[in-house]
Amino acid sequence: MPAYAGLPALAVVLALCYLVDRRTWVDAGLAHWLPLRFRLTLVAALSCLLGAAAT
């Protein structure tokens, strides 16, 4: 799969994983980590999208 197709797909997977974590981490007592998890997911997804745009 070329980078211009794979990197946006990876960004979508990262967002879906974050949505799952929002539901499961609260029950596990890890809710205080969610703001950091959101920021890291956002940076990773934007990096994937910028990388795809550059190819």
Image (tube, helix red, strand yellow):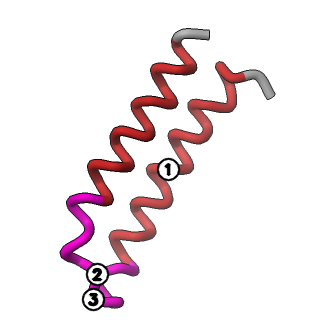
Magenta residues? Answer: 24-36
User: Residues at badges 2 and 3 in contact (C-beta under 8 Å)?
Assistant: yes
Percent position of residue 33, x then y: 25, 70
Q: Quadrant of the C terminus?
A: top right
Marks 2, 1: nearer the viewer: 2
The residue to which callout 3 is attached is 29
Q: Please report whichever mark, 3 or 1, sits nearer to the chain's N-terminal start.
A: 1
Residue 30 in picture, x, y percent from top left: 28, 81
Q: Is residue 13 above or below residue 24?
A: above
Magenta highlight on residue 16: no
Return the mark for residue 14. 1
Q: Quadrant of residue 27?
A: bottom left
Q: In the figure, 9 relative to 52: above or below?
A: below
User: Could you tell me which residue is drawn at 36 percent across and 76 percent down?
Assistant: 23
> On residue 30, which mark appears?
2
Structural crowding at the residue carrying mark 3, measured as other residues with C-alpha within 10 Å and reported as few (<14), some (14–19) or many (≥20): few
x%, y% of residue 51? Answer: 53, 20
Amino acid type of the residue that numbered disc 1 sits on in the rendered structure? Leu
Q: CA distance from mark 2 to mark 1?
A: 18 Å
Q: Position of residue 18 (x, y in %)?
A: 41, 60
The amino acid type of the residue labelled 3 equals: Gly
The local crowd at label 1, few if under 14, some if 14 to 19, many if 20 or more residues have their Cα within 10 Å, is: some
Q: Quadrant of the N terminus?
A: top right
